[in-house]
Amino acid sequence: MNKANLEQSRKDTRERILDAAERMFMQNGYDGTSMRLVTGAAGVNLAAANYHLGSKEALMQEVLRRRLEVINQERLRVLDEAETKASGKPLKPSVIIDAFFGTLLRVAADQKAGGDTFLRLLGRTITDPSNFIRTFMSGEYADVLERYRQAMFRSLPDVPKAEIVWRFHFMLGAASYAIAGTGTLQLVADWQVDEGAVAQNKNLLPRLMSFLIGGLRAPLPQIDDGNKTVWQ
């Protein structure tokens, strides 16, 4: 095997391990997934997995990183494009929300970008992360979240910044729960209408956007900030 073929073989093996790990982490969670479970699904031995990716912690980080880099780059590109079109004016909140959350659903819907498997893994990871994953995710999101935070502050100058942060926090939670998988709907099984899985996935984006925008536009709560000042 020549050098070029050897390099391609190593790359293919690495991607096969990452694809298998993505599925196993999505199905079983981080704690419920062993390296042997991953290697069995990938059809490689444990030595190969250790050679290409190292520990289970390193494997999980790389599974997330290879998808999040693409998604976050696209989020920044979409926000840059929207701000350029706005010619210095603040963006509408709905544009910002779609740029952040809509981009996630559109990019991850592409099977080459992980598709439904990665969406469900990401939702599961955000809603129930291990400590090291929380630290890793904070680093991956830091630059993107700061850009979007500033855009939201400019978009809603009359809303207290603390309230904007809280509402974005709630939006993250709602989006994470939504993409974690329709199995969570079993909590309200008696409320479900007759709709197939294909329709559920197709309608997730407009439903989620409508919900998030509605929450962002909700009247401000009456909250004592500690100085007897009440937000109306």
Image (cartoon, rainbow, N blue to C red):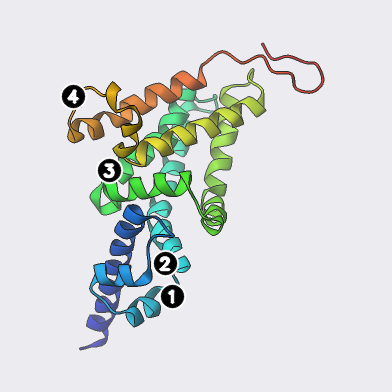
Badges 1 and 2: C-beta atoms under 8 Å apart? Answer: yes
- Decide: few, some or many residues near mark 3? Use Cα within 10 Å; few <14, some 14-19, many ≥20: some
Kindly report which numbered mark, 4 or 1, lies closer to the viewer in this rendering: 4
Q: In the rendering, at what x and y percent does residue 178 appear?
A: 37, 35
Label located before the other in sequence (1 or 3): 1
Label located before the other in sequence (2 or 3): 2
Label located before the other in sequence (4 or 1): 1
Label located before the other in sequence (1 or 2): 1
| Residue 59 disc label | 2
Q: Circle 4 is placed at which residue position?
A: 194
Q: In the rendering, at what x and y percent does residue 119 appear?
A: 34, 45
Q: Secondary structure at mark 3?
A: loop
Label located before the other in sequence (3 or 4): 3
Q: Circle 1 is placed at which residue position?
A: 54
28 versus 150 height, above or below? below
Rounded to the nearest whole Å, what is the CA distance between mark 2 and mark 3?
23 Å
Residue at position x 59%, y 30% in the image:
166
Q: Circle 3 is placed at which residue position?
A: 109
For residue 79, side relative to residue 90 (left or right) = left
Instruction: Classify the position of the N terminus by image quarter.
Output: bottom left
Instruction: Classify the position of the C terminus by image quarter.
Output: top right
| Residue 119 disc label | none
Q: Secondary structure at mark 1?
A: loop
- Decide: few, some or many residues near mark 4? Use Cα within 10 Å; few <14, some 14-19, many ≥20: few
Q: Secondary structure at mark 2?
A: helix
